[in-house]
Amino acid sequence: MNTLNDTIAAVSTAKGTGAIAIVRLSGPDAFDILEKIYSGNISVKNMVERKCYNGTIIDSTRSYSVDNVIILKFQSPCSYTGQHIIEIHCHGGAFVVQHILRLLILNGAKPAEPGEFTKRAFLNGKIDLLQAESIADTIHAQSESSLKLSQHQLHGDLSKELSAIKETLIKQCSLLEIELDFSDEDIKLADYSTISDQMDILKNRLKSLLDTFTYGKLVKEGVKLVISGKPNAGKSSLMNTLLQQDRAIVTDIPGTTRDTIEEALDIRGFIFYITDTAGLHRSETIQSKMPESSVPMK
């Protein structure tokens, strides 16, 4: 398990081959580790923060250039994690990316755990827990509505609302506690009617937040929709119409849909996971096991 004193490294872009990939370093030794494998017109120490520099990653063990890269430097504490950060923008070939990552690890970096960059941002006070969760929601957003919801949370809208509620509660509790200290002297410091009114307001605000849970869950996780009915009722036709493509087989022969067919559909910014199913009917196996008096007359 890594500590905050360790310098971590990871590939920040998705797996696969592409034009560009990004490898990141975060930690107290990020600049020194890059210096060991970087060659350019200026040293890492003298680079200006948030300015791009072109250079080369060198594999000194084999004495050859690995890739021509662009370097971005972020100084602590003005970075995403609150630590020194280096971003290496390289070509997106799988071998190139992994080779650069291996060189960083060989020179002192430790492999980052899943989500560790965001974890460090939270531990260093750059973001709160709700914002940390919203980053994952933003990455996995599959619709416009889920993206908007995660962005509101990332910008701290929910955190600000909860902080305001907490502040009001602490203030009212403080007034009551002070009055308890002077209870023997019959000194009244708190206006009970005002406190009661404040509690009613907070109760309504909390209820409003709770009422948004179901909506937020549907926006985040999507709506699961099953199309069911009798054979040849038009279930597959409905599925194809919704998807606007011939996803399910449509014939006049009953029973062409045997296994479930699942597809995701974006409807006005909301994700629906639609499942087409086989027709509902009484099977011959069940009928053969029924008592003779229970078998329907033909």
Image: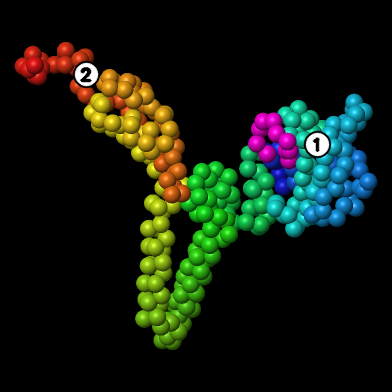
Q: Secondary structure at mark 2?
A: loop
Identify which residue, 291 or 151, lies in the foreground.
151
Q: Secondary structure at mark 1?
A: helix
Q: Is residue 265 above or below residue 172?
A: above
The residue depicted at 67 percent of the width and 49 percent of the height is 120
Q: Percent position (x, y) of residue 17? A: 69, 30
CA neighbours of label 1 inside 10 A, class few (<14), some (14 to 19), many (20+) = many
The residue depicted at 8 percent of the width and 16 percent of the height is 298
Identify which residue, 158 or 164, lies in the foreground.
158
Identify which residue, 239 or 144, lies in the foreground.
239
Of pointers 2 and 1, the one earlier in the residue sequence: 1
Q: Percent position (x, y) of residue 286? A: 19, 17
- Where does the N terminus fall, quadrant-wise? top right
- Can residue 16 be found in the magenta stretch? yes
Q: Is residue 166 visible?
A: no
Callout 2–callout 1 Cβ contact below 8 Å: no
Does residue 21 appear left or right of residue 59 in this picture?
A: left
Does residue 52 appear left or right of residue 156 in this picture?
A: right
- Can residue 199 be found in the magenta stretch? no
Q: Percent position (x, y) of residue 234? A: 28, 31
The residue depicted at 38 percent of the width and 58 percent of the height is 211
Disc 1 marks which residue?
104
Start and end of the magenta stretch? 13-22
Residue 283: assigned label: 2
Q: Percent position (x, y) of residue 134? A: 55, 51
Amino acid carrying label 1: it is Leu
Residue 217: assigned label: none
Q: Is residue 104 visible?
A: yes
